[in-house]
Amino acid sequence: MSRFSAWLSLFASTGTLLCCALPSLFVVLGMGATMAGLVSAVPQLVWISQYKAWVFAISGILISLAAFMHYRSRNEPCPIDPERARACASARKWSFAILTLSGSLWGVGAFFAFVAPLVL
């Protein structure tokens, strides 16, 4: 379950990245034409940007839920079989890495969606 929640949180944070962080980055770097091309190729980005508060709230809840589930399962025993034990340890490391990446992407997206417009 921890692996599924980690992938779900990565999916949720990628949505926030696409809606807010990448468009802002393109505009800041002077790549407005690239942003226009991206919006014309994927018009759903406009809808996601219009409802960014909902997108961030839902994705934040999903990432928090994944972090809670990962924290709760941190001391669960791995199988005795050496091969399965290695797979279990590897899955836990990957799950933590994906969760950390998800949280980082969510933070970058939140900065560009809510803080950067006030500062820049």
Image (cartoon, rainbow, N blue to C red):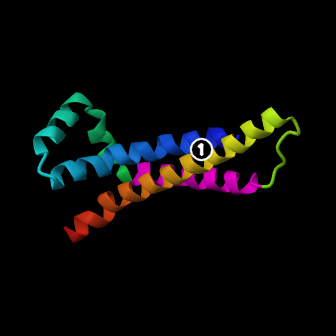
Q: Position of residue 65 (x, y in %)?
A: 62, 52
Q: Say whether residue 74 is left or right of residue 26.
A: right
x 20%, y 48%: residue? 26
Extreme residue in the bottom direction:
119
x 31%, y 50%: residue? 20
- Residue 111: name its quadrant: bottom left
- Residue 71: name its quadrant: bottom right
**40, above or below 73, in the image:** above
Residue marked by disc 1 = 6
x 50%, y 43%: residue? 10
Q: Secondary structure at mark 1?
A: helix
Extreme residue in the top direction:
41
Q: Say whether residue 3 is left or right of residue 73.
A: left
Visible in this render: residue 117? Answer: yes
Residue toward you, 48 or 16: 16
**87, above or below 61, in the image:** above
Q: Position of residue 76 (x, y in %)?
A: 82, 50
Q: Position of residue 9 (x, y in %)?
A: 54, 45
- Residue 78: name its quadrant: top right
Please provide the residue range marked out in magenta: 53-74
x 26%, y 40%: residue? 46
Residue toward you, 32 or 79: 79
The N terminus lies in which quarter of the figure?
Answer: top right
Residue toward you, 27 or 77: 77
Neighbor class of circle 1 (other Cα within 10 Å; few <14, some 14-19, many 20+) is many
Q: Say whether residue 100 is left or right of residue 49.
A: right
Q: Position of residue 67 (x, y in %)?
A: 62, 55
The C terminus lies in which quarter of the figure?
Answer: bottom left
Visible in this render: residue 50? Answer: no
Mark 1: amino acid: Ala
Q: Is residue 56 magenta?
A: yes
Magenta stretch: dominant secondary structure: helix
